[in-house]
Amino acid sequence: RRALRVHAVAELDKTAPIVRGGTSSVPAPADIANKLRYLFGRNGDYTTADAYQGTAWSVREKLIDSFNKTHEYWKKEDPKFVYYLSAEFLMGRSLINTVYNLGLEGEYAEALNQMGYEMERVADAERDAALGNGGLGRLAACFLDSMATLDLPGWGYGIRYKYGMFKQALKNGYQVELPDIWLTKGNPWELRRDDVKYEVGFGGRVERRKQGSKEVTVWTPSERVIAQAYDNPIPGYNTPTTSNLRLWDAVPVTEFDLGAFNAGDYDRAMLERERAEGISAVLYPNDSTPEGKELRLKQQYFFVCASLQDVLSRFKAVHATDFNLLPEKACFQLNDTHPTIAVAELMRLLVDVEGLDWDQAWTITTKCLNYTNHTVMPEALEKWPVKVMAKMLPRHMEIIEVINEGWTKWLAGHLKDLKPEERAKRVAAMSIIHENPWNKDEMLVNMAYLAVVGSSAVNGVAAIHSNIVKDEILNDFYQIFPSKFQNKTNGVTPRRWLAWCNPELAALITDALGTSEWINDTEKLAGLRAFASDKSFQAKWSAVKKAKKAKLAQLIKKVHGDDVNQEALFDIQIKRIHEYKRQYLNVLSIIWRYKQLKKMSPEERKKAVPRVCVIGGKAASAYDMAKRIIRLVTAVGDVINKDPDTQDYLRLYFLPDYNVSLAETIIPAAELSQHISTAGTEASGTSNMKFQMNGCLIIGTWDGANIEIAEETGIENVFVFGVRAEEINQLRKERKNLKTDPRWDELMRDIESGMFGDKDYFKPLVDSVNNMKVGNDWFLLANDFASYLKAQEEVDACYKDQSEWLRRSIMYTAGSGKFSSDRTIREYAEDIWHVKPSRPTIA
Ligand code: Z16
């Protein structure tokens, strides 16, 4: 079966291969050996890690050839570009993706086979590039893949964190965080651009000076660092296009300014190095709830400032100072509010540096910027204290004040028909700068408001979410600018998330459809519906799932030392640990299942559907409640997995260090996946789409993209439960009157009385879902508990009818066409960016 992975995809693409890259005509095996000899000083006796390094450095050259050709072409054509500004890019591994996207998989797989290696094992030696927390960062990575595949001129811009998302380990069942040391062995997928660096300033003072008849503003920062560019080529699939992700590393100014670095200044220079390097040192490990730390704002400004300078410098090289042309040549997508300081920075560059007048600069700025909102959680909408911003970015604070003055004045005029008090209220509510509602002495800059006022388009990431953005979180703004608001339902790349991570299923799909064109035209997957009830096709489909389950079973064995029943239903919940995502609800239903099994006679148990439950995900290091939830999972697992009465029927494993590559193993093996957030809280979710593509059934709430997935798959094929988003506000008000289910009460008593040990540690968890206590069950677990258990019973019943289960599984993949990020990116390109494909012609 090892060989299967290598060859299945090689056979997938029956169309003539597009020859990519390759000034180096050295055959792959010799090239790999050369790289090992001259870059690493190795002559034979290679380890698997060596084989990876040699292969990666060899593939890198093909990638660079393709990158250079693309960029030569784009330079000549000068098309409009989109720049995706994101504090996070969760890229994962690159080797498999690169060779497969470039169409070199056959060549390299064969080269490695000749050398006695198997590509999949070699690829396993690569470390993940984990420069993101979760959904938002991985979405950015999928978008880059689609942009390149669609030949859209576009780059990503972000931060080259020295330490990405922390590595999660378990110690006695508790999460511990370890540093993600990912760069020590070098990174073959990046190119340092020693000629591309910009100065970024912080602090200092702002002065007006006379320059002829004009008054100009001069900002003299007190602190300066250099942003050093690193390019990460992004290969498209089945096209000659290789695009770019440009990441910035912070280095001290003294490194380049030897004059400032004389002997007496050694200590100061070394301290400055530490301060500078601190900016790009580490990713903040918070998913959807930001941390209001100053360093975070520094990171945001650092990468935005460098990226905008970089774009303007390329623009000026071609169009000199004809800035009115800028909106026809460049646009920026703000990925959440993280890069929103771009509104003020673009104004500063155009007004202070380039000397444009304010109104002209404002027109250009608002034409160039667009904003995507990714969350409805009120605490997740970034607000920076005016004090902090004025100190770190004094000129930007001034600019934001002027923007806000203009905006509130315009707004008051626009609302002239309202009664004065009404009008004043509305204007105050929409002011970009406002009081901190929890601390009347503090003023805040509301970054979402700044983003909306400074952008042409504002979008949410799933239909329901975009509606909540319009009707609730940004409703005031929607009333003023209804046409600014759009929906762009998220998507995932079908290359990484189906074709490359599940080549066995990919081969079967290609075989059934008679073409591999579905890989970049996922609507073709709908053709699988014709096979959904075909018994012989179901058998092949099931065989693939079994093979993938066997791999996951191997992994569980490696991590936990246990053999699991591979005939059991593999039930998976993998995502960041968050109260709104309700892993806790999942655990409660597992405990309930355990208790039921425990009561049964051995004969009765034999009729039960056996399950292997897997939960994985990281808790932000400061998110106490999430850490308790992890401990509850491991504690319940410890009891259940050891119980001889039930262990053949129910297991629960926590898989540590969930990341992109682990997802690539888990998702193809999953039969049931859980997406059970409180309705109205998960903006979209994207793993739900990956599971769907891989024929995994979903149990979920009517939330985020689950809704659209159910519509595409057929609602009757999805296990939907729980209250609807429209009911949430009312239910939250009434939850003190909720009569909880007796089964729920029983489970609460079990945890409280120490059935899983650690009862003091679990007490806050029990309290948090008690509708009479502090936590107040904000996420309404108790409300959804009974309907969740009922949905779980439906799952069991369905699994007993394997033919029905397989039919549904096929219907999921068949219905996943909409959720390719190619579709999402096409919509952004057409409705927001107005960027057109530009495919390099092959010389
Ligand atoms: C994040 O991962 C998300 C939202 C956010 O504001 C910040 C971060 Cl780091 C997630 C959403 O929670 C998820 O529902 C969505 O699918 C994803 O962003 C991509 O849009």
Image (tube, rainbow, N blue to C red):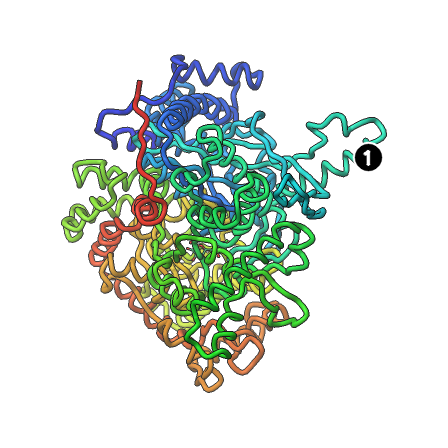
Q: Position of residue 506 (x, y in %)?
A: 27, 39
Of 139 and 37, the residue lying toward us: 139
Camera sees residue 549: no
Of 365 and 65, the residue lying toward us: 365
Query: Which residue is at 46% across, 40% downward?
Result: 91
Q: Position of residue 206 (x, y in %)?
A: 69, 48
When asked about the image quadrant of residue 20, the answer is top left
Say few, some or many: other residues with alpha carbon within 10 Å of mark 1 (under 14 / 14 to 19 / 20 or more): few
When asked about the image quadrant of residue 673, the answer is bottom left
Q: Amino acid at mark 1?
A: Asp
Q: Is residue 349 above or below residue 317?
A: below
Number of dots carrying numbers: 1
Q: Position of residue 820 (x, y in %)?
A: 31, 46
Query: Which residue is at 40% across, 56% downward?
Result: 458
**Which residue is outermost to the front?**
213
Quadrant where the C terminus is found in the figure = top left
Residue picked out by circle 1:
267
Of 596 and 447, the residue lying toward us: 447
Q: Position of residue 125 (x, y in %)?
A: 50, 33
Camera sees residue 71: yes
Query: Which residue is at 72% across, 31% downward?
Result: 254
Quadrant where the N terminus is found in the figure = top left
Query: Which residue is at 49% across, 36% downward?
Result: 311
Q: Is residue 344 above or below residue 188?
A: below
Q: From the viewer's perspective, tell me whether residue 451 is left or right of residue 820.
A: right
Q: Secondary structure at mark 1?
A: helix
Of 102 and 47, the residue lying toward us: 102
